[in-house]
Image (cartoon, helix red, strand yellow):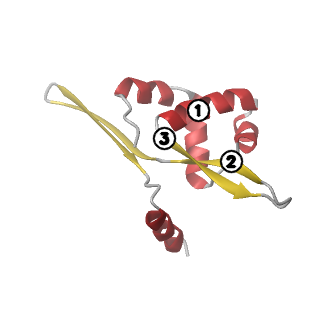
Amino acid sequence: MADVDLATVVELLDDEHVRAILAATSDTPLSANELSERCGVSTSPIYRRLDRLTDADLVGERMRPRSDGHHETVYVSRLDRFELTVRDGELHWTLDRDSDDVADQLTRLWGKF
């Protein structure tokens, strides 16, 4: 799991396209081209955002087979929850990520049936 500081998370979440990427990939894994179409932005800025999200471990990469026998990289949101609280003169924040563990993935997949 990547160590990420609060400033990085807030900066990422301040970007409307980052939020769109996280929301879209929380539902289904999507390629950069698919994200480009959904966000209405060319693939170059999408890749820049995906790189930053991947570095922060908020998005994971997977391989998806295509019908032509090749494969493509798709992205999936790992951000499960971000919480910021201010209480008693102190700032606290937590960031929960979905696990990349194969057993956890199978459990989530089985739960969808």
Picture quadrant of residue 89: top left
For disc 1, the marked residue is 51
- Across and down, in percent, residue 47 comes to 66, 32
On the picture, is 45 further left or further right than 96?
right
How busy is the neighbourhood of tag 2: few (under 14 within 10 Å), some, or many (20 plus)? some
Residue ranking furthest to the left = 88
How busy is the neighbourhood of tag 1: few (under 14 within 10 Å), some, or many (20 plus)? few
Of callouts 2 and 1, the N-terminal one: 1
Residue drawn at (74%, 44%) of the image: 34
In the depicted structure, whether residue 34 falls above or below residue 43: below
For disc 3, the marked residue is 58
- Across and down, in percent, residue 69 comes to 82, 60
Q: Amino acid at mark 2?
A: Thr
In the depicted structure, whether residue 44 falls above or below residue 107: above
Of callouts 3 and 1, the N-terminal one: 1
> Is the Cβ of the residue at disc 2 closer than 8 Å to that at disc 3?
no
The CA span between labels 2 and 3 is 16 Å
